[in-house]
Image (cartoon, rainbow, N blue to C red):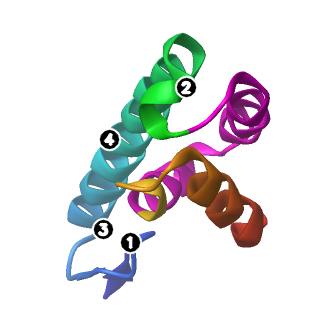
Amino acid sequence: MYKAIDGTLFQTNWRCKLHNSILRSNGRSTIQQNIRLLKQHPEKVGGNKETAKELIELLEGISDDQAWLVAKAMAGLSLEKALETVNSMRI
């Protein structure tokens, strides 16, 4: 059995690699969309420019392997809560 980065088990290595690739791609894409939103309209996510800048710096340092996890953890959160969540993950 092969274990993907999200803990899903696969019987074949190629399926595991494909699954990991999709997670990385989707996670990175979501992080980039979040960064774009934070740069353009931080007020839309309940924050200010200073807090948005701090979160953007953290998000830009996220590895592709962890991007899906961070994106999932931030979903639906305000800017303050997202910043708190990402900081607590210590990625």
Reply above or below: 56 against 74: above
> Of residues 33 and 83, which is closer to you in this image?
83
Q: Amino acid at mark 1?
A: Ala
Q: Quadrant of the C terminus?
A: bottom right
Per the model, the C-alpha gap separating discs 2 and 4 is 22 Å
Q: Are marks 1 and 4 in contact (CB under 8 Å)?
A: no
In front: mark 1 or mark 3? 1
Q: Quadrant of the N terminus?
A: bottom left
| Comes first in the chain, label 1 or label 3 | 1
Q: Amino acid at mark 3?
A: Asn
Reply above or below: 67 against 90: above
Query: Does residue 34 appear to the left or right of 66 in the view shown?
Result: left
In front: mark 2 or mark 4? 2
Per the model, the C-alpha gap separating discs 1 and 4 is 15 Å
| Comes first in the chain, label 1 or label 4 | 1
| Comes first in the chain, label 2 or label 4 | 4
Q: In the image, which residues are magenta?
A: 47-72
In front: mark 2 or mark 3? 2
Q: Amino acid at mark 4?
A: Asn
User: Can you identify the residue that label 2 sits on?
Assistant: 42
Q: Position of residue 32 (x, y in %)?
A: 48, 26
Q: Are marks 4 and 3 in contact (CB under 8 Å)?
A: no
User: Can you identify the residue that label 1 sits on?
Assistant: 4
Per the model, the C-alpha gap separating discs 1 and 3 is 9 Å
Which disc number belongs to residue 59? Answer: none
Which disc number belongs to residue 13? Answer: 3
> Of residues 39 and 70, which is closer to you in this image?
39
